[in-house]
Image: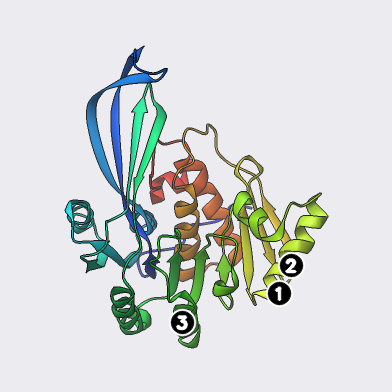
Amino acid sequence: MIMELPDTRKARVLVVGDVMLDRYWFGEVSRISPEAPVPIVKVEKSEERPGGAANVARNIAALGARVALLSVVGADEAGLALARLLADSTIDASLHEDAQLNTTVKLRVIGRQQQLLRIDFENAPAHEVLRAKLTEFRQRIDDCDAVILSDYGKGGLAHITEMIRIAREHGKAVLVDPKGDDWRRYAGASIITPNRAELREVVGRWANEDDLAARGAKLRGELNLEALLLTRSEEGMSLFTADGVRHEPARAREVYDVSGAGDTVIATLAVMLASGRSLAEAMHWANRAAGVVVGKLGTATCSLDELKG
C-alpha cells in the first residue's frame, strides 16, 4: 500500500530537552604521530550544527512543520553559537541562560571521512533555571499539537514528570526519547522511542521475538504508555501497542553515520501524528526518514522531498 504524505504545514510541535552544539573538524590523515600510536589530523575545515533536542527541532522544521524549542544553555561562546544557528532557522527557540552552566559541546574529529575521536564538554544546569523553563512550558502547551521530551541525560529535564502530567491534562500527545535505566519518570507519556541498547538496559536481554513482545508489553503496561517504538538499526523498527506488535524493515540503502538518527525518528513521528496520521503510518514515515539520515555524515535532517523519494 502506497501512503501519501500529509500536509505538515499546520502541525505544531513543542520540543523540550537537552540541547548541545555539535562541532566537526575535518582534515586529512597522512601519518602517525611519533609521540603515540595515533593518527595526525591536519584540520582543513570546521563546521557547527545544532545537536540534541535542537537537532530534533531542526528535523521538524525540515519536514515543513512549525516548531518551538525550549531548553537551557550556558552564558558562554558555545551557547551564543547555538543561539545564532537557531536564529538563522525557522525554529522558535527559547534558550534560558544559566551562568553556572557550560553549554554541552560534542567535538568530532573526522579524517578520511571517518570519525576518529569525539570530545564532550558538559555539566548540569541549575535548578532555578529549570523551574523557569517549567513555567514557560505551561504557557506554551496550548500552542502545540504534540510535545517531544528529548532526554540526553544532561539535566535539562529535571521536571519531566510534571511536564508529562501538564501535557496530558491538556490533551497533547507526549513523545519521549529516553535515557538511563529508570524510566518511571516517563510514566503516562504517549510514546517512548528507545533503541535496542536503551531498552535492554531496562528490560534485560530477550531470547527471541516472542520474549521481546512480552517484555515490551509488560513495560508498556507498567508505564501506562499508549505505545513503545523500538528502533533496531539494521532490523528496522517495532511498534508495541495494545493491539500487538507491528514491524517495519530497515530502509537504509547504505549506512554512513547513525549519529542523530534517533532525533530524526522521534521528530518525524511527532510531525506525522500532529498532522493527523495514525501511529502505524507515522512509524512508516519515521522509518523512511531514518533510512535517509543514516546515509549522511553527522547529525542531519530529512526533507519532505527526500521522504517522498
**Which SS class for mark 2?**
helix
Nearest to the observer: residue 77 or residue 215: 77
Which residue lies under the disc numbered 1?
A: 221
Which marked residue is nearer to the observer: mark 2 or mark 3? 3
Which residue lies under the disc numbered 3?
A: 162
Disc 2 and disc 3 in contact, CB within 8 angstroms: no
Q: How packed is label 2: few (under 14 Cα within 10 Å), some, or many (20 or more)?
A: some
Disc 1 and disc 3 in contact, CB within 8 angstroms: no
Residue at left 40%, top 51%? Answer: 304
Q: Amino acid at mark 1?
A: Gly
Disc 2 and disc 1 in contact, CB within 8 angstroms: yes
> Residue 48 in the image: x percent, y percent?
25, 43
Task: Identify the image quadrant of residue 114.
Answer: top left
- Identify the mark nearer the N-term, 2 or 3: 3
Residue at left 59%, top 76%? Answer: 187
Which marked residue is nearer to the observer: mark 1 or mark 3? 3
Which residue lies under the disc numbered 2?
A: 217
For marks 2 and 1, give the CA distance: 6 Å
